[in-house]
Image (tube, rainbow, N blue to C red):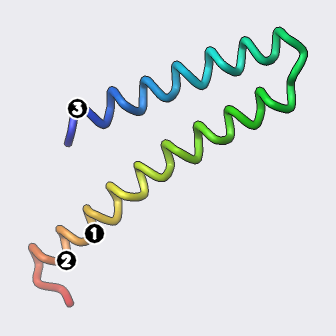
Amino acid sequence: MNVDLIFRIAAIGMITAILHIVLEKSGRQEYAYLVTLVGIIIVLGAVINLVSQLFADVRVIFRLY
């Protein structure tokens, strides 16, 4: 597993959390929730990519077509 991906996910989480707190303190709760949702979607996109790559590797290893 790539350690780089773990750091990227952690960085996205920290940036999302900071933006959420700043927007919430300024009274823009809708934008804060939107920023959080976008952060989750970005991370899920990366995870889905990894899972699809895992299934492709398993298919190749066990010669499942």
Residue found farthest to the right: 27
Residue 59's label in the rendered image is: 2
Q: Do the numbered discs 1 and 3 sit on residues whose CB atoms are within 8 Å? A: no
Q: Say which residue label 1 marks.
A: 55
- x, y (%) of residue 15? 54, 21
Task: Estimate the spatial distance between the alpha carbons at disc 3 and disc 2, rounded to whole Å.
Answer: 24 Å
Category of crowding for the residue at label 2, using alpha-carbon neighbours closer than 10 angstroms: few (below 14), some (14–19), many (at least 20): few
- x, y (%) of residue 3? 22, 32
**Badge 2 amino acid:** Arg
Category of crowding for the residue at label 3, using alpha-carbon neighbours closer than 10 angstroms: few (below 14), some (14–19), many (at least 20): few
Name the side, left or right, on which 64 lies relative to 17: left
Select label 3 or label 2 by which is in front.
Answer: 3
Q: Nearer the viewer, residue 15 or 48?
A: 15
Say which residue appears at 25% left-offset and 62% top-offset: 54
Mark 1: which secondary structure?
helix
Select label 1 or label 3 by which is in front.
Answer: 3
Task: Estimate the spatial distance between the alpha carbons at disc 1 and disc 3, rounded to whole Å.
Answer: 20 Å
Residue 3's label in the rendered image is: 3
Say which residue appears at 30% left-offset and 37% top-offset: 5
Q: Do the numbered discs 2 and 1 sit on residues whose CB atoms are within 8 Å? A: yes
Name the side, left or right, on which 19 lies relative to 33: left
- x, y (%) of residue 21? 72, 14
Say which residue appears at 11% left-offset and 78% top-offset: 62
Number of numbered markers: 3
Location of the C terminus (image quadrant)? bottom left
**Badge 1 amino acid:** Phe
**Badge 3 amino acid:** Val
Task: Estimate the spatial distance between the alpha carbons at disc 2 and disc 1, rounded to whole Å.
Answer: 6 Å
Mark 3: which secondary structure?
helix
Mark 2: which secondary structure?
helix
